[in-house]
Structures are given as C-alpha cells and as structure tokens.
Image (cartoon, rainbow, N blue to C red):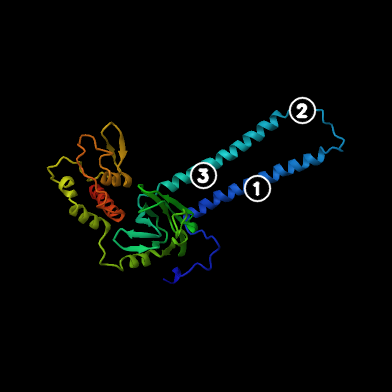
Amino acid sequence: MAGTDAVSDTPLLPQASTLAERVDALFFTLVGVDVLMVLVLSGLIIGFAVYYRRSARVNRTTNVPETKTEIIWSLGLLTIFLAIFVWAAHLYVTEENPPRNALEIHAIGKQWMWKFEHRNGQREINELHVPLGLPVKVVLATQDVIHSFFVPAFRAKQDVVPGRYRTVWFTPSRIGRYHLFCAEYCGLDHSRMRGQVIVMEPAEYEAWLAGDSGAESLPVQGEKLFSSLGCIICHGAGSKVAAPSLAGIFGKPVPLTGGQTVVADETYIRDSILMPEEQVVSGYEPIMPSFVGRVDQSDLTKLIAYIKSLSREEARP
C-alpha cells in the first residue's frame, strides 16, 4: 500500500490513465494550431499595417488576383482541421465504448457523496479503489439531482442525469491517489462532494476486494430482491403468467408494441421497473405494476446486476 499514499511527487495535473495521454495530445495540438494561427495572422496584420501606412509610398492601385495562393491556403487549412476533427471524433467514440472485459463498478451520486459498489458487494463512499493497468467501467446513476463524475488526472468526466444510466471508463496507468469531484453544481454543499480514486497494483486490489468476505455479490443481492418483490412469479422460469423472459435480454434489441425497438440497457430496465406501461414488449399486455416507492436507486442497481448475470449465464458454453 505504500505506493497509494499520495501523489505529491506528481505534476500539478498528472496523466494517470491511458486516456489522459491521448486527450492531452489532442488538446496541446489544438493549442499549438491556435497559437500558430494567432502569430501568423497577427504578423500579417501588423506587417500590412506598417507597409501600407498612410505615409508609405506604395502602389495601392494594382489588383493582382491570387487565386492559386487562396486555393492552397484554403485547402491546406481545411485538411488540417478535418484531420483534427477525425482525430477528435475517434477519441470520442473510444471514450463512449468501454472494452467488453472492463471491470464493472456501480456508482450512485447523492447529495453530497459518491457511493460505489463492486461486483462482489464491497462498498465504498467517496473512495474508489481500482487496479493498475486494467480497464474500469463505472456505471453511473443519481439518486436526486444532476451530478458530474470528474477525475481530472484521468481526463474522465461524465454527467449523471436523473432517470438515466451513464458510463465512464478509464485504464489507470499510474499508482496513487487522485481527486474525484462533482463538476456540476448540485446544491448547497456541492463543494464538499469530492473523494479519491485509489489506484493499486492488481494483486493489492484483489486482496483489498476480498477483505470484506461477508459481503454478497450484487447479482446475489439482486436475485434475493427479485424474489422478495414477487418478480419471480411472472418472470421466473416455468411461470404461468404471460410475461417476457429476462434470460439473455440485456444488451439485446426488444420489440415494443407499436413497432418500435429498443436496446435492453440499464435505462430500459430501470424504466420497465418504474414505468412498465411506457414501453410494453410486443405480444404482451401492460399488466405489470409500477415499483415506484418500493425500490430505491440502490435496489435498482442490484436488480440490474442480477438481470445482467442472466445474460452472462446464457452466454456460457
């Protein structure tokens, strides 16, 4: 644990993830191009102002067309800026698509704290332990207002909107403790909504994760909640009630009444639990009751983890 005590030997804004290096490369390229353009244009303005000053004896009547120069100048700038656009678009797509093998951690923003839960049931508040060199996917939700998950050293930032699930991912590249902020004004004590991301060696992380051996995994907690709420009566195997099967549903397209199709992601499952009449599966009647007031955001996290686990089990050979 000695390597996780502080980051006092790091620069003011360290690059602590593989994404940070790529974001900085793009940022400083943009800054460089901007500075170059300012210098070139400022130099031309000053040069022309001096050369064509009122007292200068220069020919101001000749109008020589510079079509070739204008074409080269315009196409050159267009090429540069299109290349930067493609570069930025590729980086954006990469940021929005976490690797399939990413370690999944659930986070809930709440006035004024960050609550984390690992897959084995280990919980944290305002601290997030992650392994070095492995991609980490954080599934974000909020219990009240808009929050924004922001780790400057990772160049990772994602707004968290009520009623929706968002994800942010990163691959830590440097051991240490790094600031975690809420970057969206969320109320009176917004400035106190901060924490730390603690990057550890993989072996140390596994030892830390196994420290709370009495915790139940999220899918197990979700399965128990699934039964206690009575969901198994309709959605369980062998049920006589006409309800869609949940096995293997996560991440798959779901046809709805009316001809639309949606992907069964975290937001769809949440809406189906709280607002079941909004998106009725094709071929089924809208008979499912709403669970508003019966489950909170933490319960939804557990239920979603359980439904995800059904898809993983189906995928096994």
Q: Is residue 250 visible?
A: no
Q: Is residue 150 visible?
A: yes
The residue to which callout 2 is attached is 64
The percent coordinates of residue 194 (x first, y second) are 44, 61
Q: Amino acid at mark 1?
A: Val
Considering the image in quadrants, where does the N terminus appear? bottom left
Q: Name which residue lies at 29% across and 61% down.
A: 121
Q: Spatial distance from mark 1 to mark 3, Cα to Cα?
A: 19 Å
Tag 1, which secondary structure? helix
The residue to which callout 3 is attached is 88
Q: Amino acid at mark 3?
A: Ala
Q: Quadrant of residue 296?
A: bottom left
Q: Which residue extends farthest bottom? A: 2
Tag 2, which secondary structure? loop
Q: Quadrant of residue 285?
A: top left
Q: Spatial distance from mark 3 to mark 2, Cα to Cα?
A: 39 Å
Neighbour tally class for label 1: few under 14, some 14-19, many 20 plus, Cα within 10 Å: few
Q: Earlier in the sequence, mark 1 or mark 3?
A: 1
Name the one closer to the observer, 123 or 317. Answer: 123
* 100 with respect to 307 (left or right): right
Q: In this picture, is 280 found above or below 202?
A: above
Q: Earlier in the sequence, mark 3 or mark 2?
A: 2
* 189 with respect to 38 (left or right): left
The residue to which callout 1 is attached is 35
The percent coordinates of residue 52 (x first, y second) are 81, 37
